[in-house]
Image (tube, rainbow, N blue to C red):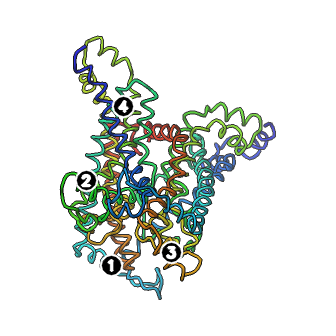
């Protein structure tokens, strides 16, 4: 320690205060171990996230494989014009936004109901059992979900066509060929998979409420229903609003697995199952249209970017702790 | 006691009983189909109470275990390597961010954070990995893209470090002359077991359940993981037979194969490890989700 102090005395002339740059450099040296620790993660972010951001220029290029990405001629806004003039652009935007809208409304209301009711159960063991069962769908992959849905909807031997149709006397339906049923199917499947997760988040918020409110309310003779509507809901309202705003900020993105695996990539279902994410994938892998699929991806990212900024601004005003930045 | 209060409890339990049944029922159906006799499926369709049981589907899968064993091996290998590396680089990035005195802290946070705001989209991302890094048909194609470090997990870990590791511990380490790495490994990590377990579990599930990277980056049947094998089999049972010893046998095998049951049996084999392990890890998983909820 004394050695360090004496060397400081030599380098720093007493009359001139050390410049900010020098302090910074000395700090860098002191903390170099910590900064070195961050390098693997930093490299990963650059490769996985930042280099692809640069690839966005592909949307403005007319890619040909001879000249490569950088040698290919510029195409201006051609790819975007082509995309927005096709009927697909409207369809995939509508599907993505409407599905997400439906998911937000259905999942939030059911998850809230579940969370409020779980809170009424005082037995810890039973609570844990219920929580575990309704979280189970959340941990399995969309591939498995596709299997589960198939076991119900399969045309020849599926449970609905063979058993339920018999019980209730309706004709069997060729589920994987009829586009108009899928909005309901996908909303139900998404609810089945994600309500447990959301309910646990809301349940955690409810548990965080100070018990004294309820004690005071009970003394005043407030019914359970009154306690729920006058204490619990208002106190977790900021949380609900925040979660909803965050969902709205990603309303242009969709769970690729849900819209690709669960309808089993079935052609006739496209009008109601194609979203921006599945469209980008198909345009690139199936049709090899790099320009247009990149353009669709850029469209999605840019809209999302502004939605996230907007949502964050709104969240900040409601609850600063929950804002992203 | 008013009537409303007396029936409230049973009603709530009834609600959850139905909810639990709805959560579990699809798994039961798939399992029942996998042990149903093929002729019974043809006659009555999929049923919770099949008229005739038969384990032929499992027998078939175990007789031709080649592809399944390989895919299982790939999944286990990728999951183990991926989870360990992922936990490592996440912790190494999160810990310095939790130190308030770190120079460049705001810059680093912004670099991390901006990835949550904007992305180049799937196409440039895919091209980066295929043309720049040559990850096509490589095990790394299932480990590295998107799964290795998530900004959300870093933030989760950072707030755990910032909130639960007392600054005095780091100071005492410095006074004793320990290097930053020693402080991190010997003092911070042992105190952070809950968050380490949570993030490891998140990673484990992500790698085990991944089929997307496999679909994008892998063409070779010998590198296909169990989730993608399941995808292929759901669409086309023939895929399972592809790896049978000789192609002349394939036709014969397919003719004898209980196709419907085999699909479902594969699904059961694919999820069995998860379902068996679930009771043991769900406690940590739930606490992980809730800690993420308290401060996102």
Looking at the image, which residue sits at the far top? A219
Residue A186 location, x and y as percent? 29, 56
In the depicted structure, whether residue B248 falls above or below residue B92: below
What is the distance, in whole Å, between disc 1 and disc 2 at their CAs? 55 Å
Query: Would residue B136 be seen by someone viewing this image from the given angle?
Result: no
Looking at the image, which residue sits at the far bottom? A66
Give the residue number, with chain letter if any, for mark 1: A76
Q: Name the chain under label 2.
A: A
Give the mark, 2 or 4, whose residue is nearer the N terminus.
4
Per the rendering, the mark at residue A164 is 2
Residue B263 location, x and y as percent? 44, 63
Give the residue number, with chain letter if any, for mark 3: B253
The answer to which image quadrant residue A174 occupies is bottom left
Graded by Cα atoms within 10 Å as few (under 14), some (14 to 19) or many (20 or more), the crowding at tag 3 reads some
Graded by Cα atoms within 10 Å as few (under 14), some (14 to 19) or many (20 or more), the crowding at tag 1 reads few
Give the residue number, with chain letter if any, for mark 4: A118
| Same-subunit check for callouts 1 and 2 | yes
Q: Name the chain under label 3.
A: B
The answer to which image quadrant residue A143 occupies is bottom left
Mark 1 vs mark 3: give the one in front: 3
| Same-subunit check for callouts 4 and 3 | no
Mark 2 vs mark 4: give the one in front: 2
Q: Quadrant of the N terminus of chain A?
A: top right
Determine the residue positioned at 50% across, 48% down: B275
Determine the residue positioned at 24% across, 22% down: A226
- Tell me the SS state at disc 4: helix
Query: Would residue B161 be seen by someone viewing this image from the given angle?
Result: yes
In the depicted structure, whether residue B2 falls above or below residue B263: above
């Amino acid at each position: 320690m004394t050695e360090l102090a004496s060397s400081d005395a030599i380098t720093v002339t007493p009359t001139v205060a050390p410049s900010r740059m020098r302090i910074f450099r000395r700090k860098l040296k002191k903390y170099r171990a910590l900064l070195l620790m961050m390098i693997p993660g930093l490299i990963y972010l650059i490769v996985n996230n930042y280099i692809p951001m640069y690839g966005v220029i592909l949307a403005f290029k007319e890619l040909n494989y001879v000249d490569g990405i950088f040698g290919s001629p510029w195409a201006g806004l051609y790819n975007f014009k082509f995309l927005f003039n096709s009927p697909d652009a409207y369809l995939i935007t509508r599907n993505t936004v409407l599905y997400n809208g439906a998911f937000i409304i259905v999942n939030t209301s059911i998850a809230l109901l579940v969370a409020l009711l779980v809170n009424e159960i005082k037995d810890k063991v039973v609570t844990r059992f219920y929580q575990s069962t309704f979280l189970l769908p959340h941990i399995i992959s969309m591939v498995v979900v596709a299997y589960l849905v198939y076991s119900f909807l399969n045309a020849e031997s599926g449970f609905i066509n063979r058993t339920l149709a018999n019980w209730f006397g309706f004709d069997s339906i060729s589920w994987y060929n009829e586009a108009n049923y899928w909005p309901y199917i996908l909303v139900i499947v998404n609810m089945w998979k994600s309500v447990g997760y959301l309910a646990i988040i809301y349940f955690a918020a409810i548990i965080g409420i100070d018990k004294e409110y309820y004690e005071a309310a009970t003394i005043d003779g407030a019914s359970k229903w009154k306690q729920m509507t006058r204490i619990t809901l208002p106190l977790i309202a900021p949380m609900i609003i925040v979660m909803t705003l965050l969902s709205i900020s990603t309303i242009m993105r969709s769970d690729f697995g849900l819209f690709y695996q669960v309808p089993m990539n079935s052609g006739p279902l496209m009008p109601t199952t194609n979203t921006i994410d599945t469209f980008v994938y198909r345009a690139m892998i199936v049709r090899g249209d790099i320009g247009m699929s990149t353009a669709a991806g850029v469209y999605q990212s840019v809209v999302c970017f502004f939605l996230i900024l907007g949502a964050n601004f709104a969240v900040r005003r409601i609850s600063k702790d929950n804002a992203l930045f | 006691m008013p009537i409303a209060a007396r029936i409230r409890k049973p009603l709530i339990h009834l609600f959850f009983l139905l909810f639990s049944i709805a959560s579990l029922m699809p798994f039961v159906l798939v399992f029942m189909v996998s042990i149903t006799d093929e002729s019974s499926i043809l006659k009555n369709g999929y049923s919770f109470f099949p008229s005739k049981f038969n384990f032929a589907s499992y027998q078939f899968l175990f007789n031709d275990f080649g592809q399944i064993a390989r895919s299982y091996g790939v999944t286990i290998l990728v999951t183990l390597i991926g989870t360990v590396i992922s936990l490592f680089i996440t912790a190494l990035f999160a810990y310095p961010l939790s130190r308030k005195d770190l120079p460049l802290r705001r810059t680093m946070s912004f670099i991390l954070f901006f990835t949550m705001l904007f992305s180049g989209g799937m196409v440039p991302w895919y091209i980066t990995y295929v043309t720049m890094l040559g990850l096509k048909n490589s095990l790394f194609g299932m480990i590295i893209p998107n799964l290795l470090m998530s900004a959300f997990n870093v933030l989760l870990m950072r707030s755990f470090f910032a909130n639960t590791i007392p600054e005095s511990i780091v100071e005492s380490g410095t006074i004793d002359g320990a290097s930053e790495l020693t402080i991190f490994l010997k003092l911070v990590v042992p105190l952070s077991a809950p968050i380490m377990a949570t993030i490891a579990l998140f990673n484990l599930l992500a790698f085990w359940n991944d089929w997307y990277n496999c679909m994008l980056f892998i063409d070779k049947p010998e590198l296909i993981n169990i989730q993608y094998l399941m995808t292929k089999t759901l669409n086309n049972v023939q895929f399972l037979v592809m790896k049978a010893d000789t192609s002349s046998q394939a036709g014969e095998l397919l003719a004898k194969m209980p196709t419907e049951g085999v699909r479902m049996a594969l699904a059961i084999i694919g999820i069995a490890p998860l379902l068996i392990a679930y009771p043991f890890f769900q406690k940590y998983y739930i606490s992980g989700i809730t800690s993420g909820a308290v401060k996102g």
